[in-house]
Image (spheres, helix red, strand yellow):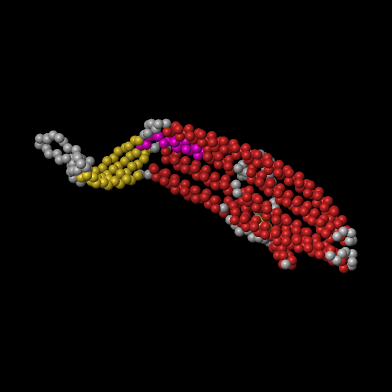
Amino acid sequence: MKNYIKIIFLFISITSIAQEKLTLEECYTLLNKNYPLAKQTELLAKQNALDLQVIRTGKLPQFDFLAQATYQSDVTSIPIAIPGSTIEPPNKDQYKATISVNQLIYAGGLIDASAAMKAASLKTTQKQVEVSLYQLKKQVNQLYFSILLQQEKYDLLTSKTALLEAKLKEVKAGIKFGVLLPTSDSVLEAELLKIEQQFIEISFNKSSLINTLSELIGTKINATTYLENSVVLIASNNEIKRPELDLFQLKKDEIESSNHLISKQNSPKLMSFVTGGYGNPGLNMLDNSFQSFYMVGLKLNWNVFDWNSNKKQRESLLINKEIVDTEETVFKLNTNIALNQQQDEIDKITSFIETDTSIIALRKAILETAASQLKNGVITASAYITELTNLYEAENNLSTHKIQLLLAKENYKTTKGNPAP
């Protein structure tokens, strides 16, 4: 089992030289490309294009076909007799089929305002998708740096293993020449077995994290893929550049478009029309025969009084705009609070790293002394392992704090937002 695990990790170490590499920025790109929600941007654009086509049909001629057959209980008749003429009343059964063509001439810009409203709505919904995707970045950060931490732990364990194996050879030589107790090597071998268990735990932890990250970004990540540990730079300015701020502005623009559309709703509408038909009777009600007929003209429709409906809709939009302003203010406030907290976290971890460096220097000195004492039989192998473990824990703390610092800085950048290109 021991040799089998060594072979696996030796293979991973060798292949890591030519293995695939993955950066955090590439994870962001894959997230925005492959996450199911990202498909909505294109779908919304297609839907909006269809809606605009429907709206613009209002400028095209409208065709109506009507066919009817009726029977009425009474018809118009002349109650007096006119000498020398015979006027027959219309038939009680009447038939008519017509085709009408209506062409909008003027609507006060209502159709263009409706199209502009749709365009503004599209920008808002697409930006909402972008905001939702952006909010997933912290989840990507957590997974990415957790995998980095497992990589660092593996490297530290590898160094610890190499040191223990070298020390085991010395101890076996000491036992052979009677300098050390016969069981001293067993203590070191037991510690190596514990390290093998830790290797297995790291392997499973990393595999689980990689699988979760793979699902999130929609791309299979191999177990041998090396995640790059790059330096995270934070911009010195305090300006927040989050997509949510763009979303708030787009919501305001949409409200303005709605207001413009409402202002056009009561505009006069002028239309021309042509109606042609065939029926009995035709336009001449006194001719009881099937006739063709036509009619051309203009129609004007103007809603001059709407019981202040238009005014109340505009007042509602003003309230909606104030709500958006309030949401924007709250968002900025909460973001600044979060940035202050994250900056405090960055400062705290930075202080830890400075202390970790001093602790490691002291632990290395102590371990060198312990190694010399073990070689001369002054202390037991257990005492040496205790000091070695103390050094490993100090190095592990430093490694953990460095990864935590990178995560804290990346979360700070994510909270603050990326500056405009």
Q: Classify residue 62 as left or right of residue 215.
A: left
Q: Quadrant of residue 11?
A: bottom right
Viewer-proximal residue among 93 and 268: 93
Q: Is residue 386 above or below residue 283?
A: below
Is residue 17 visible in the rendered structure shown here? Answer: no
Is residue 339 found left or right of 67 in the rendered image?
right
Residue at 58% x, 42% y: name it. Answer: 244
259 left or right of 32 in image: left
In the image, 102 versus 363, the foreground residue is 363
Position of residue 183 in the picture relative to residue 42 (left or right): right
Q: Quadrant of the N terminus?
A: bottom right
Judge whether residue 259 is colored magenta: yes
* Quadrant housing residue 213: bottom right
Residue at the left extreme?
84
Count of marks, rendered view: 0
Magenta region's main secondary structure? Answer: helix
Q: From the viewer's side, name the closer residue of 193 and 279.
A: 193
State the extent of the magenta-drawn residues as a range: 253-270
Is residue 244 something that shows in the picture?
A: yes
The residue under the point 37% across, 31% down is 304
x 57%, y 45%: residue: 131
The spot of residue 47 in percent (x, y) is 47, 48
| Viewer-side residue, 303 vs 359 | 359
Is 199 within the magenta?
A: no
Up the image or down, 312 lies above or below 347; here it is above
Q: Quadrant of the C terminus?
A: top right
Q: Residue at x 59, y 56 (%)?
A: 215
